[in-house]
Amino acid sequence: MVYAVAMKTIAHFEKALGREAMWADHDPAGGQKGQFLQRLRVHPHALRAANAFYSPAKKALLFGYFRAGTDGLHVPGSTVFSCLSSDIVAHETAHALLDGMHSRFIEPTHPDGLAFHEAFADIVAIFQHFTLPEVLKHQIAQTQGDLSKTNLLAELAQEFGRATGCRRALRSALGTKPDPEALRTIVEPHARGSILVAAMFDAFLKIYQRRAQRVIGLATQGSGVLPPGALTPNLVDALAQEAAKTALHFLNASIRALDYCPPVDINFGDFLRALITADADLVPSDARGYRIAIVDAFRDRGIFPDGVRNLSEESLLWPSCGYSASWFIEELRTELLKIQYAASRAERWERSRDLRAWLHDRLAQEPNQDLEDFSSATGLVLGSKKLSGLHRSGANHSPVFEVHVLREARRAAPDGSIRNQVIVSLTQKRIIPAGHGLPEFKFRGGATLIVDLDSLSLKYCISKRIDDDVRLARQLSFLRDGLPPAIRAAFFGNSQTSKYFEPLAMLHSGDWQETSYAD
């Protein structure tokens, strides 16, 4: 069962991303020093505990098992296996896939950081419910087609939750009214992440209800009022089809948006902008109002991106990159041929690593003025600019940076056209003293470059500037005051301790204590 659900989750990612999925490299530092990971290890009976988690250090999914209490569902004292919950398997697999795409997201640099990891995994698990036809039809019939009522589709790990004493599902996307102020006070990652999950499900419900009204209108000869009693099988089937189509669109859009996120210091507002930009890039005409529904739902939950003047679609789109970068894009397209004809995932990874090294050298050797202009566009320091804590190397004392990711994407639009892109992530770090008795820490900057191979242009440059003093101050405040002692100690520990840092295991075991930290 674990294998089947994990493979189904991987298939959804690969379809949405337009490429093969890759796991995070063996080397926790990533970049060009990592080693290829052929397989994610999966241990269905890993630990005797009411827990399950993805381990970035072991590159494995670890599922626990425990004795049931008196929950009214299980025989008291019987064994409950978390690996038998498809929700938990999908959730943990999504953690691993997200870490394979953005290994820096696991670092607790922002109140939204680990919360985003948890929320995104929940979003994947919830929307995968709608790919189960019999379950979907059963819940449509039971709720009379109104999915805003309490239903299993919006709940995660119901059996596991009851067995651990929650008396309900582990988490639910329903049941909380929108509160624009909640993000100011809620820090615990699961609780904070549930705000993002609820926003996505609110948007889904709005679109589903709109599509369902048309079906119900046809079934009721235009009255829109269902007669008392059970829905007819044909109406259940029609509503289930509408729900499945809508959920699949939201699932694909959520996964696709990961390519449009900055490579470091993620927050919910960044994800909103990535969602809108990725969807508009593939489907320019929002005929069904998906993007409007998403923006409305995020606004109702108090999720606002930094640096936008309003919440119109035009403002939320990542701005087009004003820098052409023609000096490396044409060469990049030629070099990509080496990846396209790779015979295996391992060979594709090796050629991608070589291409990252080529691009790194190409950027480092560019004439000074072009490099300065490129630095300005990406928010990194690649030229002669002085910046405290920035490591330099070589005879020329060049700033150290890494080409963190270089991957292709071939996505099919609804009209049948293909979008050919290359996703490049550049990252850089500064070593900053933390003060207050804490050792120094790594402050990262980075940029995601979306290269359009059809037009040979640099379409987007999505950056978190390395010289952003406001972001640095906010991150430092969070590291000092917003982290629980266990996670702060691991994050600020020595290199050997940090190598085995297991933040997701800590979160799932309840080591995060609620605080009153606010941005």
Image: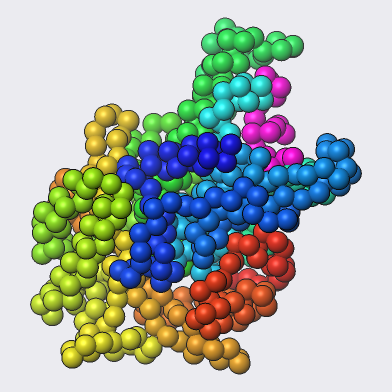
Q: Which residues are magenta?
A: 141-159
x then y, percent, for residue 479? 57, 78
| In the rendered image, the vertical position of residue 316 relative to residue 112, given as above or below | above
- The colour scheme used here is rainbow
**The furthest residue to the top:** 221
x then y, percent, for residue 87? 62, 41
Q: Is residue 224 visible?
A: yes
* Magenta stretch holds residue 460: no
| Front residue of this view, candidates 250 and 203 | 250
| Front residue of this view, candidates 404 and 77 | 77
Q: Is residue 137 left or right of residue 251?
A: right
Say which residue appears at 71% left-offset and 44% top-offset.
81
* Magenta stretch holds residue 149: yes
Say which residue appears at 51% left-offset and 21% top-offset.
241
x then y, percent, for residue 97? 46, 51
- Quadrant where the C terminus sits is bottom right
| In the rendered image, the vertical position of residue 225 relative to residue 304, given as above or below | above
| Front residue of this view, candidates 103 and 314 | 103
| In the rendered image, the vertical position of residue 397 relative to residue 293, given as above or below | below
Say which residue appears at 42% left-offset and 85% top-offset.
431
Q: Quadrant of residue 173?
A: top right
Q: Is residue 182 visible?
A: no
| In the rendered image, the vertical position of residue 72 relative to residue 456, given as above or below | above
x then y, percent, for residue 142? 71, 22
Say which residue appears at 34% left-offset and 86% top-offset.
390
